Image (tube, helix red, strand yellow):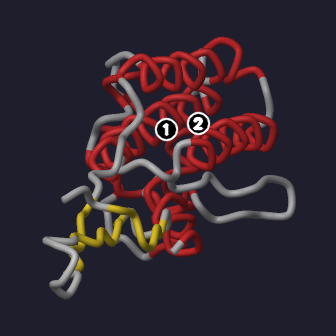
Amino acid sequence: MSPSVVNHKPVAMTLWVKEVASKFSEPTYKNLVIPSRSPKDNRKAKLYDKIRELLYRKKAAAQPLSLVFTKVNQVVRGWINYFKIGGMKSFLIKFSQWLRHKVRVVIIKQWKLPKRIYTNLMRINKVLKCNFSDEDIHKTANTRLGWYKRSTGHVINFLLSPKVLGISKADRPGLVDPLKYYLTRKELQM
């Protein structure tokens, strides 16, 4: 009564196993689902460390956004392509939120002065037609919170949304959304 492997589909992660009860009975087939493996915690920590090193405030704010986005996109795409066979959707949801927050911090840090922050946020507000009041943007630009806390406000989160960060322009690529990229790679694999 030993099962023998008949058909192996690595893409769907299933095995068709032929069970033979005896010499004289018809074989039956079972569909065994193999659980998908996700990257280990130490690999996830290495990804966080690599991105943290690339988005170190002093270094990243001194470089043009095109260079920062290119490096971050290379690391994220490479990591996802390497681990795409594993299940990591919930991890990538958290990671993409953290990544966008770090990028917002770098952008606000590059703008530096409250006047420049105000003018750039007003310009984005006008283009996207978000209807934030002049007072809301003025409060955000002139707050004395640190860079990290300043980037958590709803005005900046809404104006520098994933859609806005993902827009590629002539001078810079858009920031890759890790979850969308993973799901497209997963679909291509199947």
Q: Which residue is mark 1?
A: 104
Q: Amino acid at mark 1?
A: Arg
- The image shows residue 132 at horizontal and vertical percentages of 31, 62
- The image shows residue 35 at horizontal and vertical percentages of 27, 52
Q: Amino acid at mark 2?
A: Ile
Q: Quick one: label 2, few (<14), some, or many (20+) residues within 10 Å?
A: many
Callout 2: SS: helix
Judge left or right: residue 179 versus residue 172.
left
- The image shows residue 92 at horizontal and vertical percentages of 38, 46
33 or 23, nearer to the observer = 23
The tag on residue 107 is: 2
Q: Are marks 2 and 1 in contact (CB under 8 Å)?
A: yes
Residue depicted at 71% across the width and 15% down the height: 59
The quarter of the picture where residue 150 lies is top left
Judge left or right: residue 112 versus residue 105.
right
Residue depicted at 86% across the width and 55% down the height: 171
Residue depicted at 33% across the width and 51% down the height: 36
From what the image shows, is residue 89 above or below residue 147? Answer: below
Residue placed furthest toward the right: 171
13 or 85, nearer to the observer = 13
Callout 1: SS: helix
Residue placed furthest toward the bottom: 26
